[in-house]
Amino acid sequence: MSAALPLIRGPRFIALPGLPRLRRGKLNVIAGAGGDNKSSLAVLYAATYSQTGGNVCLISTEDEWEDVLPRLEAADADLSRITFRHKPYRLPEQTAALNTWLSRHGAGLVILDLLEDCKPGRSEFRPALIPLVSALHRTDVTALGIVHTNKHLRNGQSALDVIPGRRGDLAGICKAVFVIARSADDPEGTRYVGAAKWNHGYPPPSLAFAVESVEVPPSDLHTDTIEEVVRLRPVGAVAMDANTILRQAAALAEPDEEAKASARAKAWAALLAVLRDGADHPREDIRKAMEADGYAWATVKRAAGEQGVQTKPDPNDKRRKLWFLPTGVLLQLLDAEQDDGGDDGWEPVS
């Protein structure tokens, strides 16, 4: 007699209104470039799932609760069904602790934003995530990981080539991989989402989302001021696959050298306004502020490297990095401003 087949528990997808369906009990991934509203899409998944009566555990390593909360409110989330955590679980060592946390809160969906922060340094994804993938299968919890794309799509490449890690590393253990990118026709107001990998029948259709600025009134849960946040609103299906979505967006990301130099100069001017006090500043705080002002993080990092910005660990938390300008660089900037007749009303750190 043949062995009994394992019991399949209900529909094998999570289908939410206006969103690409997810593989239930599996690891799903959304990948996108900086500023393409990956986290806004994650918030929309969390809010919409909570509206169906499901519990969500949301880990956001780049944003604090006070930043995420008004975005959840703007998306009409049922906050009683959402549990938030800022500190990532380190996988694979803390897989059991993550599972305990999910079980304690009865989560059907866990969002890991950013997924890169859950693994050790530059190590590969597969060894870190295999225990989690096995646990998701046993518990029927669905995971949605958010990652940065590692480059722009080039000729002869497919969408999976921009997923971080070696080909077959992260993408190989995911059951569904989606990409999000700007619309070339409306780069500020529209995002496209398409399936780069879907290993169960026909992939879900690619979708368009409108980028909206929403004012969230004060509440008992956050500050007494009006919060202006970004929200994604589902628009409908678009006739583009993931490769086409990335190719049309790549044209926006390839400025000429003069434009790149100008972008770095503007980013440096904004960064200098923060660092010129000579103090140490948390890198993640700088990143949030710069991206909020519309600067690409890759441009900021390159400008910082060109201008001599230094990095050191936070003495209170070795996992955090601090940025600062060395005294010598500050003195050179002061001399240059004096030579140019600029404002010399500030003093360098001694």
Image (tube, rainbow, N blue to C red):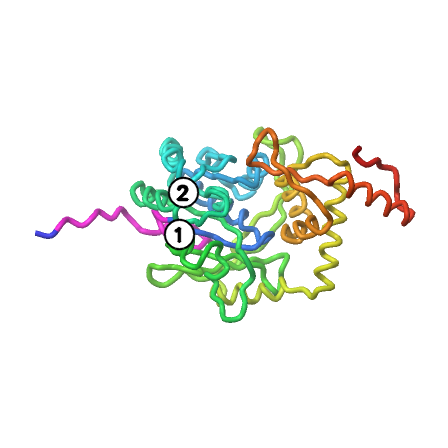
List the single residue furthest toward the front: 328
Front one among 197 and 45: 197
Is residue 306 inside the magenta stretch? Answer: no
Front one among 155 and 69: 155
Q: Quadrant of the C terminus?
A: top right
Q: Is residue 162 left or right of residue 186?
A: left
Looking at the image, residue 151 lies above or below residue 346: below
**Of marks 1 and 2, which one's residue comes earlier in the chain?**
1
Q: What secondary structure is the magenta-colored segment mainly?
A: loop
Q: Secondary structure at mark 1?
A: strand
Residue 261, position in %: x, y? 73, 59
Is residue 12 inside the magenta stretch? Answer: yes
Magenta stretch, residue numbers: 3-26
Q: Is residue 87 left or right of residue 201?
A: right
Residue 331, position in %: x, y? 82, 41
The amino acid type found where label 2 is placed reads Leu
Residue wearing tag 2: 109
Query: Could you tell me how far apart the alpha carbons at marks 1 and 2 are, in whole angstroms?
Result: 10 Å
Residue 92: image quadrant is top left
Residue 309, position in %: x, y? 70, 44
The answer to the question of whether label 1 and label 2 lie on touching residues, with beta carbons closer than 8 A, is yes
How dense is the environment of label 1, judged by Cα within 10 Å: few (below 14), some, or many (20 and up)? many
The amino acid type found where label 1 is placed reads Leu
Q: Residue at x 72, y 56 (%)?
A: 263
Residue 102, position in %: x, y? 39, 35
Where residue 22 is drawn, which disc sits there? 1
Q: Residue at x 50, y 44 (%)?
A: 121
